[in-house]
Each structure stands twice: as structure tokens, then as C-alpha cells.
Image: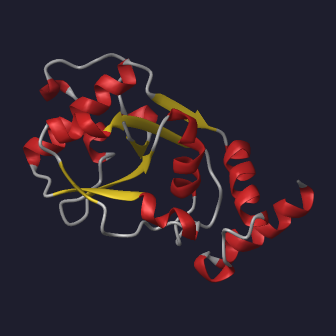
């Protein structure tokens, strides 16, 4: 069973499970920023592939600095069972070119479906399907990908590429 990974701002989500969902703070919902009624996630085969999702999430083409990252993961089947539509046709915005096809959009979202996604995230946080990666952990993943020639210069912001060059000399 595949997992779908979403980057979140953990501080926006409450520590306790919110029931009813109407009590969930707007800050948590705003963490589920959509564009064109879609929400971006990254697909991995299992929990052992979490570094793959974090690598994809940590460096979009607009990324200029490396930061901590927090992720939550959901079972793909849970979303499908809730009638959330998935679309794998759009490549993801990551500088790690070989991971662009791991991108999935949750599509045709509306108020109700976004609430379902928020509810699933709350359940997964309660089940500890959450992990925080420190800046140094993210740096290590990016440097490994850079040294393996998985990050072409033309895909990166100039600032990120310079950072990766400097870090690769030190690690």
C-alpha cells in the first residue's frame, strides 16, 4: 500500500484530536494551501522511503535556503475510500529530477473534501504518522543527491545550487 506525504507546519495543528472538526483552527486549514482546487503530495512505497519524499519536498525550483521540514503521511487507500480524486499526470516541482514523477495531486477539492483531508491528517498525527527532519538532515539528503548528479544546476535557484556546492565540499 502506497503512502502519500504532505509537508505541514506542525505548529498549526493541535496536539489533541479535534472532534467535531468544526473546532479545528483556521491556521491548520490554511496549511492545506490549494491551487486550482488541488493539493500537492508525494507518493512513496512505504515508510522506509520517507527520505525520498523529504528530498522531493525540501527543494522546489524556487527554494533558496535549506530548512527544517515536517511531514505527515496518509495511506493512499484511505483517501481513495473517502472519494478523494488523485491525479499523477503532473510532474512535481522538485529540483531532484528523477523524483518529479513521484508527485500526486489531490484534485477537484471543495470545502467538504478539504475537511476530509484535514480530518485524515488529524487522525494520522494522533497515530504518530508524523516526522520532523532537521536542517542538517535535509542538508545531508540534498548533498547526497547533488553528489550523485541528481540535481542539475539549471533546475535550482542560484542560491540553493551555491549552497549545495559549498556543503558538498564540507561533507
Give how far across and how far down residue 42 sits, in percent. Answer: 42, 52
Residue 57 is situated, as x and y percent measured from the top left of the image, at: 51, 54
Q: Is residue 68 above or below residue 123?
A: below
Give the answer, above or below, for where 34 lies relative to 26: below
- The answer, for residue 50, to whether it is visible in the render is yes
Picture colour scheme: secondary structure
**Quarter where residue 25 is shown:** top left
Residue lying furthest front: 1
Instruction: For the N terminus, give its image quadrant.
Output: top left
Image-quadrant location for residue 17: top left
Residue 25: tell me if it is visible.
no
Where residue 69 appears, x then y in whole percent? Answer: 55, 44
User: Residue 31 versus residue 81: which sits nearer the camera?
Assistant: 81
User: Within the image, what quadrant is residue 126 found in?
Assistant: top left
The answer to whether residue 55 is left or right of residue 14 is right
State left or right for residue 53 relative to residue 15: right
Compared to residue 59, the image places residue 154 above or below, namely below
**Residue 102 located left or right of residue 142:** left
Q: Is residue 46 above or below residue 17?
A: below
- Determine the residue positioned at 57% across, 49% down: 52
Number of callouts: 0
Q: Residue at x 22, y 30 (%)?
A: 119
User: Farthest residue in the right direction?
Assistant: 170
x, y percentage for residue 29?
25, 41
The foreground one among 39 and 104 is: 104
Give left or right: position of 158 versus 95: right
Q: Nearer the viewer, residue 143 or 111?
A: 143
Amino acid at each position: 500500500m502506497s503512502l502519500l506525504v504532505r509537508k505541514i507546519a506542525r505548529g498549526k495543528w493541535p496536539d489533541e484530536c479535534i472532534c467535531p472538526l468544526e473546532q479545528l483552527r483556521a491556521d491548520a486549514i490554511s496549511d492545506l494551501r490549494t491551487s486550482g482546487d488541488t493539493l500537492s503530495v508525494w507518493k512513496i512505497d512505504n515508510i522506509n522511503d520517507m527520505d525520498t519524499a523529504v528530498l522531493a519536498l525540501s527543494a522546489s525550483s524556487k527554494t533558496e535556503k535549506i530548512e527544517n521540514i515536517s511531514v505527515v503521511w496518509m495511506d493512499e487507500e484511505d483517501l481513495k475510500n473517502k472519494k478523494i480524486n488523485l491525479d499523477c499526470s503532473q510532474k512535481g516541482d522538485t529540483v531532484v529530477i528523477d523524483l518529479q514523477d513521484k508527485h500526486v495531486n489531490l484534485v477537484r477539492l471543495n470545502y467538504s473534501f478539504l475537511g476530509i483531508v484535514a480530518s485524515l491528517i488529524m487522525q494520522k498525527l494522533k497515530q504518530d504518522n508524523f516526522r520532523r527532519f532537521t536542517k542538517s538532515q535535509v542538508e545531508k539528503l540534498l548533498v547526497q543527491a547533488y553528489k550523485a548528479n541528481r540535481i542539475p544546476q539549471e533546475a535550482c535557484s542560484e542560491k540553493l545550487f551555491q549552497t549545495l556546492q559549498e556543503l558538498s565540499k564540507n561533507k
